Amino acid sequence: MTARASTGVLGLLLATGIAAGTHAETFRWAGTTDPQTMDPHAVSSAPVLGFLNNVYEGLVRRGRDMSIEPALATSWEPIGDGAGWRFFLRQGVTFHDGSEFDAEDVVFSYERASSEASDVRSWFATVSDVIKVDDFTIDVMTNVPNPIFPDSIANWMMMDADWAEANGAERPDKESGNHATLNANGTGAFVLSGRQPGLETVLRPFGGWWGEVEHNITEATFLPIQNPATAVAALLSGDVDLINPVPIQDAERLSGQDAVKVIRGIEARVIMLGFAHEAEALKYGPNTGDPNPFRDVRVREAVASAINVPAILQTIMRGSAEPASQLVSPAMRGFSTANDMRPAFDPDRARTLLADAGYPDGFSFGLKCPNDRYLNDEAVCQAVVGMLAHVGITAELDAMPVRNYWPELREDNFDMYMLGWSPGTFDHEHPIRFLASTPNSEKKLGSWNFGGYSNSRIDELLPMIQSEIDDTRRQAMLDEVTALYQDEHAYVTMYVQPLVWGAQSSVELTQRPDNFFILRWVTVN
Amino acid sequence: MTSVRTAPDRFNPMALRIRAMWQSDLAWAFRHSPVAMVSFVVVVLLVSGALLAPLVAPHDPFDPATLNLMNGFTAPGTPNAFTGESFWLGTDDQGRDVFSTILFGMRISLLVGFAAVLLGMVIGVTLGLIAGYRGGWTETIIMRVADVQLTFPAILVAMLIFGIAKGFTPVEYRDQIAIWVLILAIGLSDWVQFARVVRGATLVETKKEYVQAAQLIGRSGTAIMIRHILPNVLSPVLVIATISLALAIIAEATLSFLGVGAPPTQPSLGTLIRIGQGFLFSGEWWILFFPACTLLALALSVNLLGDWLRDALNPKLR
């Protein structure tokens, strides 16, 4: 073990030395959100998974255009008639500590990622078993035919079974954390060499990486900078090479500068408001303890009609975002064109609906918001508070950093909340599985459906969608689900978040629509 | 200090009193200090603007129902492109009139400032009197605690108290009590100055004959401290209180700027500056500039008044 570790270190030193000879570059980048854990199975959120994609790898990965390509598996094929998938693993791959990657690690990573403590277990909702065939072949067996399974596991990252066992991190721990929260041992192109939560995270190239090196980075440091203006100042002064995101209000001005460039795209992320569907009573404000009005679909529709999305896009988002009619953006597979209409802004209708529902004088409730997660999240929430006040509903806004936010939502501490969702599979089925199906821990469904929205027909359709191979029939079912959650106003989908990165002009990179920053595609000239 | 020049009384007692005040040394010093007069006018204008905010302000920025998001980012004096409405000092990102937010924000800043100084003064003067009059162990304990606290920057102490208080309050009440926690935090970080000065002055006064006379006739210690010593140590307290007011306003702004003070729904000047800071690069300068100017004017004029008061009350400078 020690011998292996030292070869790993030696390889690392060699790689550093070689790279230093050619184009030695340290690279610093900043984002609003610090990835709260280094454990790839503990938190299913883009800042964590996006960051860890540089350190850990899955059986498959996504290319620059989001297409699926081989990573730790070199090829795969369906087993029988929809019984599962067989993956042939890449040979000669080592983890950062020097130990070999083989089928044992895949089986362990499946057990870990699908365990009770994992946040990503709904990825494996259709999986019945993962079987080691030989050292470099595994079979993933599914309950029902799952034609898109290889497309859905790009973020299922492989962890070394021995390393996890030796360090007591066999299961993820999202609350108190364990060894894997601060340390990492993946197979990826970069090694985690320093981690100070909230301050900085340092990555170094992995000399023993199996892939072809395209970057010229010798060291990369991620810095969480919560204040957008500070991040812009750091970029302009050359302190950092990349910031994600650029505050929308500053994009215009940065574009005009020679030393920096602004890289824009449409993100896959839909920003929405969620309700407490299940809660019996209101939890916040002067009406605490009163029956929960959001159980009434008329109240939810009133909220949807009261929010002036075009005004939010015009002012706060400065015209650089698109309204969202459903849980996914039009660029995603399975987008329901038939249901591409979002509720119109109509405060009079909202007041009428509220009066019909028995709230002619409105009511008070608590709105939870993150303030360092999405572009201008707090400002949007404040605007929502104002718009709801116009129709007589008083929202008490509680905005907080994400490290407090997700735990609050998990504990059901909200009446209404803000959520952004980017489908990891780039498919409409993904948010339906996570957000629209009834929460079911056993079946690994609805794990981010905090409000407990439930519709039996959607629950019935989801497995059918997952196993349907015919695109037309699949789309028909997706259309039906979309119409169902739209009619019930399960969520108020507001807009598709724009993707705005800022970088020094000398930096060449690839911006992926899932907002993942992939370090191995970066070159600094 | 308040010597009344004798003159034949042809007026009613009230007029006489005003006349006496006008002719007092303090008033004389005031009338001959242009800096003091200008500062005084600025303070009076700002304070009355804040007090009368609901009457003076064109909008109520705390009532979200009156806001129109489409008014967001309107430049000062120019009509908004969508609504055609015009705002004297422009609007912020939520379409709130900056002038109104400043007036309402100043209420929070002044409330916190005055209340915190009052709290600090009550604690400091009481402890200073006890330490100076009693002496011995009491004095040692009080003054050593004061010394220890003095080694920490006041803003750190305030942040510590703020953090502890926040930890003990349930989340749903945090916004409601944030202002009171601020007052407590700044007040408790600020009593030391009062205590030290009052203790020093008390030590001097205690040796004087009128105090000894009061002790001889058997008055209680508490009575001597409050009735006899306190009035004679008040003038330096007044000076410190004025200067502390400026410092407390700045401390509040600093805490709010750092995001640990007044909540965004009840913005103080510091919160407004924090919000405005996000728009500095994008050219919406007015969101930051006007609240910052107001804070500057308020703190500077209170400070100048305090300086003048110190000089005016200092017999050596007369």
Image: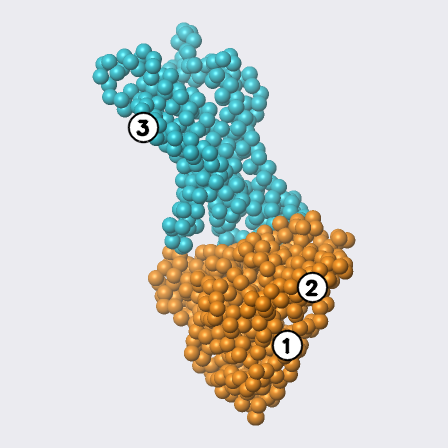
Chain colours: A orange, B cyan
Q: Nearer the viewer, residue A19 or B309?
A: A19
- Give the percent coordinates (x, y) of residue A178: 47, 64
Q: Label 3 lies in what chain?
A: B
Tell me the number on the disc at residue A253: none
Would residue A64 be visible to someone looking at this image?
yes
Pointer 1 residue = A92
x 62%, y 49%: residue: A230
Q: Identify the residue under disc 3.
A: B138
Q: Which residue is mark 2?
A: A15
Quarter that holds the C terminus of chain A: bottom right
Q: Would you say B311 lies left or right of B174 here?
A: right
Numbered disc 1: secondary structure: loop
Mark pair 2, 3: CA separation: 68 Å
Q: Are marks 2 and 1 on the same chain?
A: yes
Q: Amino acid at mark 2?
A: Ala
- Name the amino acid type tagged 1: Gly
Q: Is residue A263 visible?
A: no
* Chain letter of the residue carrying label 2: A
> Which residue: 30% across, 15% down?
B211
Same chain for marks 2 and 3?
no
State whether discs 1 and 3 lie on one chain.
no
Image: B38 above or below A127 = above
